[in-house]
């Protein structure tokens, strides 16, 4: 899809569809609205508005033919809601809805989008770009009948075509393209997205250096927690380290770790069928990290970024780790396995130790870690916690811009107390209540003095019902927030 800006008056733009964003105001002040309304014999104001066929409530839509009165054969009206409540996030959602609507039409290869843009339009233009690409997404790889994505060109009507607005289109394209990349990867079944596959994908990213460590090398590095989780699977574990270094001196060094359990059966503490069903998504953190590293290879920020994934499958066979086993993590701490289904934190423990040895300024991990987080926040928000308030605040600020909600949860000593073991340094599970914080407390044992934030995306990575324009399935959560955080 090609997305570009156009300064020409809207009525001079050639397109198959004119998308008009309409604010919920008593009188339509917008010049473009008036121009289009006048050119179509006031069809919109007379027939549509007055007859109340369409009210510009947020995300309501109405399609009308223009019967040869203007160049464009069809107009799509999309409600943007109250003017004072308009935001980049709302504009992104309206663009998602627009792209979905366009899929239902037959002959729309070129759409011209006319939304009310503020003087400084960069953020809104980025949001429109992202929304169109995210809304146009289908996961139909395994369908015999593919949906035809007919939308080829998108023209965004804009008073300015300055370099900075052009750049916001490029930024939006990259943010959305790799959101969709992460969605694809988490939507893929576990038979496809194996640890080996994740390693191959990491290797294929241009402009970054990738090292893959297999079982023997991980053993030498002392990754006893990570290796235990993967030892019951026929799929070999892969520890993936991608690094991007800017050509200029880096303003800071960052490590992002993605949970990469390519299938979580629960192990011997096996999950019931309904809970196991979507466990191909347990590598959504890894998918986000792969997407982010790919995006970074194009965006080339002045930040050194290490992308880390400890990828394996949590399965059952005669070699699987068992409840009661005692594992030694890379930093020498011992862990009594209380529950083989609390595997993500074990893999993250070694990944956190590895990241800290890179002497980075900040570590951020993103993981589908706990059902408890999903119970607390649902698919409405991801959990965020860590050891540094400013880092957490800054990620939250970035997430607000990206339109992804992150809500702060505590990590207290009391949470850690519940992980006490009689025979090892800690158990891998503690109090069932506040389970997201308890998992966070466990992870904290593997970060000694680096700023660290933990993102629990168990409820937001994979939807079982549509939400905010995203259909059922993978959302690519975290890609846009962390890209915003890294490139801000
Ligand atoms: N992958 C799951 C968490 C999860 C649950 C992700 C639902 C997405 C949706 C994780 O490995 C897990 O099984 N966690 C256990 C921990 C428990 C045994 C302490 C859980 O949340 O039940
Ligand atoms: Mn599990
Ligand atoms: Zn898991």
Image (tube, grey):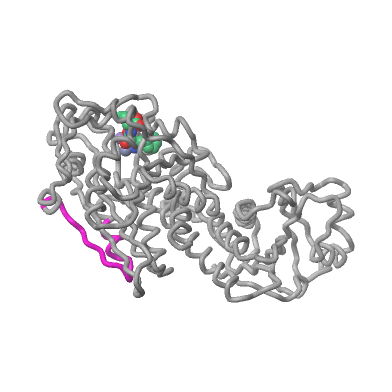
Q: Is residue 87 left or right of residue 191?
A: right
User: How many numbered discs, if any?
Assistant: 0
Q: Position of residue 472 (x, y in %)?
A: 50, 43
Name which quarter of the figure residue 320 lies in.
top left
**Residues shaded magenta:** 199-216
Q: Is residue 333 magenta?
A: no
Q: Position of residue 28 (x, y in %)?
A: 83, 56
Q: Position of residue 175 (x, y in %)?
A: 48, 60
Note whether residue 231 is visible: no
Q: Nearer the viewer, residue 13 or 407?
A: 407
Q: Nearer the viewer, residue 445 or 100?
A: 445
Q: Nearer the viewer, residue 381 or 466?
A: 381
Q: Is residue 393 left or right of residue 286?
A: right
Name which quarter of the figure residue 167 lies in.
bottom right
Residue 160 against residue 484 in the figure, above or below: below
Note whether residue 134 is visible: yes
Q: Is residue 244 left or right of residue 426?
A: right
Q: Is residue 202 magenta?
A: yes
| Residue appearing at x 36%, y 50% in the figure | 364
| Residue appearing at x 35%, y 38% in the figure | 369
Q: Quadrant of the N terminus?
A: bottom right
| Residue appearing at x 41%, y 48% in the figure | 187
Q: Position of residue 465 (x, y in %)?
A: 52, 38
Ligand 1 picture quarter? top left
């Amino acid at each position: 899809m090609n997305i570009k800006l156009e300064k020409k008056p809207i009525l001079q733009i050639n397109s198959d569809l004119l998308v008009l964003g309409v604010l919920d105001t008593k009188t339509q002040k917008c010049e473009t609205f008036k121009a289009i309304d006048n050119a179509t014999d006031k069809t919109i104001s007379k027939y549509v508005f007055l007859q109340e066929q369409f009210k510009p409530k947020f995300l309501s839509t109405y399609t009308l033919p223009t019967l040869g009165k203007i160049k464009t054969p069809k107009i799509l009206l999309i409600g943007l809601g109250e003017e004072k409540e308009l935001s980049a996030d709302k504009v992104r959602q309206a663009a998602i809805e627009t792209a979905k609507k366009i899929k239902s039409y037959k002959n729309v290869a070129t759409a011209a989008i006319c939304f009310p843009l503020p003087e400084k339009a960069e953020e809104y233009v980025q949001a429109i770009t992202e929304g169109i690409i995210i809304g146009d997404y289908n996961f139909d790889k395994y369908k015999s009948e593919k949906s035809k994505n007919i939308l080829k060109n998108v023209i965004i009507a804009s008073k300015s075509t300055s370099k900075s607005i052009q750049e916001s289109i490029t930024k939006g394209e990259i943010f959305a393209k790799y959101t969709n990349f992460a969605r694809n990867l988490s939507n893929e079944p576990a038979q496809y997205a194996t640890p080996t596959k994740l390693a191959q994908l990491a290797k294929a990213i241009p402009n970054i250096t990738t090292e893959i460590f297999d079982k023997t090398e991980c053993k030498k590095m002392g990754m006893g927690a990570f290796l235990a989780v993967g030892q019951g699977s026929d799929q070999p574990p892969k520890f993936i380290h991608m690094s991007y270094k800017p050509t200029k001196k880096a303003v800071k060094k960052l490590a992002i770790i993605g949970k990469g359990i390519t299938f979580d059966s629960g192990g011997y503490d096996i999950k019931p069928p309904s809970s196991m069903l979507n466990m191909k998504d347990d590598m959504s953190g890894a998918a986000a990290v792969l997407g982010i590293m790919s995006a970074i290879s194009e965006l080339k920020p002045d930040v050194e970024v290490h992308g880390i994934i400890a990828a394996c499958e949590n399965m059952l066979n005669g070699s699987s780790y068992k409840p009661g086993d005692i594992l030694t993590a890379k930093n020498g701490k011992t862990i009594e396995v209380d529950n083989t289904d609390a595997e993500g934190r074990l893999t993250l423990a070694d990944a956190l130790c590895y990241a800290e040895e890179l002497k980075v300024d900040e570590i951020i991990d993103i993981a589908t870690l706990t059902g408890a987080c999903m119970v607390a926040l649902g698919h409405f928000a991801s959990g965020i916690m860590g050891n540094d308030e400013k880092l957490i605040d800054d990620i939250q600020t970035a997430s607000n811009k990206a339109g992804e909600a992150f809500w702060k949860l505590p990590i207290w000593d009391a949470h850690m107390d519940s992980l006490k073991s009689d025979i090892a340094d800690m158990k891998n599970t503690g109090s069932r209540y506040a389970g997201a914080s308890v998992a966070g407390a466990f992870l904290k044992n593997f970060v000694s003095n680096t700023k660290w934030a933990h993102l629990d995306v168990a409820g937001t990575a994979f939807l079982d019902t549509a939400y905010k324009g995203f259909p059922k399935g993978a959302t690519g959560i975290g890609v846009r927030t962390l890209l915003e955080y890294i490139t801000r």
